[in-house]
């Protein structure tokens, strides 16, 4: 049997939809889950695979992406520790409609469709929390579509910085400090803007006093 210390470190404990479950249920999850490690650039799942698993990020972060008709990568979501993906397999037997790839070395907890469905049957409140995540992700995708369709390059970059500040920013003396979870290239793939344009526009925003570039991975929003 898993010790209490192990239960507290279980990846499922980091996930909002599971975090409130009692310890005896977390023990069930321990027994259900398998664990995998991936390196940056690996493909975890792709559109030619049947969706039959749910993945929980235990350490690291990943990107979910697809390709445009022009063959360009379009990032849909950036997910971090405690997030999950593959949940649509609970509602339909279809293929993934995205690629998932690590942004660095990551560790995943993996659950089968059957195990999670059985858990939901026992604890139906989990399904409501999953639907809440669905709603937030759909809302983000709608905003992404609107941004890509209507805004210029600078506005797209500003919207991305604001989103990152809401999701992972920390207060600092000069504003809100963001540790960028993605590279300049991935920022371009998210916003539909060339990498060179990303760098140029960030420098412009810094010259205008809106941001301060600390390093390649850290930016302070001085004036939201």
Image (cartoon, rainbow, N blue to C red):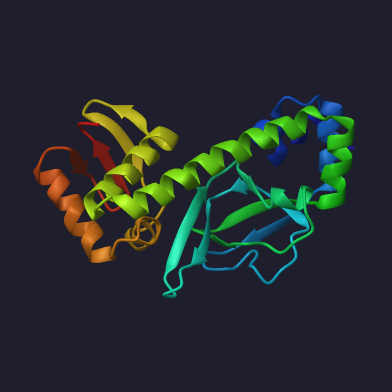
Q: Is residue 55 left or right of residue 63?
A: right
Number of marks in the image? 0
Q: Reply above or below: 188 against 67.
A: above
Residue extending farthest to the left is: 207
List x then y, in percent, for residue 44. Answer: 64, 64
Q: Reply above or below: 99 against 218.
A: below
Q: Is residue 71 visible?
A: yes
Q: Residue at x 47, y 45 (%)?
A: 142
Q: Is residue 8 visible?
A: no
Q: Reply above or below: 209 against 172.
A: below
Q: Is residue 204 left or right of residue 137?
A: left
Q: Reply above or below: 217 against 68.
A: above
List x then y, in percent, for residue 152. Answer: 24, 53
Q: Which image quarter is the N terminus in?
A: top right
List x then y, in percent, for residue 61. Answer: 53, 51
Q: Which image quarter is the C terminus in?
A: top left
List x then y, in percent, for residue 219. Answer: 27, 43
**Toward which corner of the image does residue 31 lie, by quadrant?**
top right
Q: Residue at x 30, y 45 (%)?
A: 218
Q: Is residue 182 left or right of residue 87?
A: left
Choose between 69 and 211: the one closer to the eye: 69
Residue extending farthest to the bottom is: 71
Q: Is residue 195 left or right of residue 112?
A: left
**Toward which corner of the image does residue 174 lie, by quadrant?**
top left
Choose between 168 and 48: the one closer to the eye: 48
Q: Residue at x 68, y 53 (%)?
A: 86
């Amino acid at each position: 049997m898993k010790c209490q210390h192990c239960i507290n470190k279980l990846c499922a404990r980091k996930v909002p939809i599971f975090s409130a479950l009692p310890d005896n249920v977390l023990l069930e999850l321990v027994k259900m889950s398998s664990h995998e490690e991936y390196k940056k650039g690996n493909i975890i799942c792709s559109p030619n695979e049947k969706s039959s698993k749910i993945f929980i990020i235990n350490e690291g972060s990943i990107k979910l992406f697809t390709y445009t008709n022009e063959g360009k990568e379009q990032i849909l979501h950036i997910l971090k520790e405690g997030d999950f993906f593959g949940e649509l397999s609970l509602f339909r037997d279809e293929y993934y409609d995205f690629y998932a790839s690590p942004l660095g070395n990551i560790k995943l907890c993996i659950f089968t469709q059957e195990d999670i469905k059985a858990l939901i049957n026992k604890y139906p409140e989990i399904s409501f929390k999953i639907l809440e995540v669905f709603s937030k992700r759909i809302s983000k995708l709608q905003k992404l579509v609107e941004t890509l369709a209507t805004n210029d390059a600078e506005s797209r970059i500003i919207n991305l910085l604001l989103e990152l500040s809401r999701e992972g920013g920390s207060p600092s003396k000069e504003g809100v400090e963001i540790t960028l979870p993605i590279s300049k290239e991935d920022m371009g793939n998210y916003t539909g803007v060339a990498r060179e344009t990303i760098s140029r526009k960030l420098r412009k925003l810094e010259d205008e006093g809106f941001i301060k570039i600390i390093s390649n991975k850290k930016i302070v929003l001085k004036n939201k």
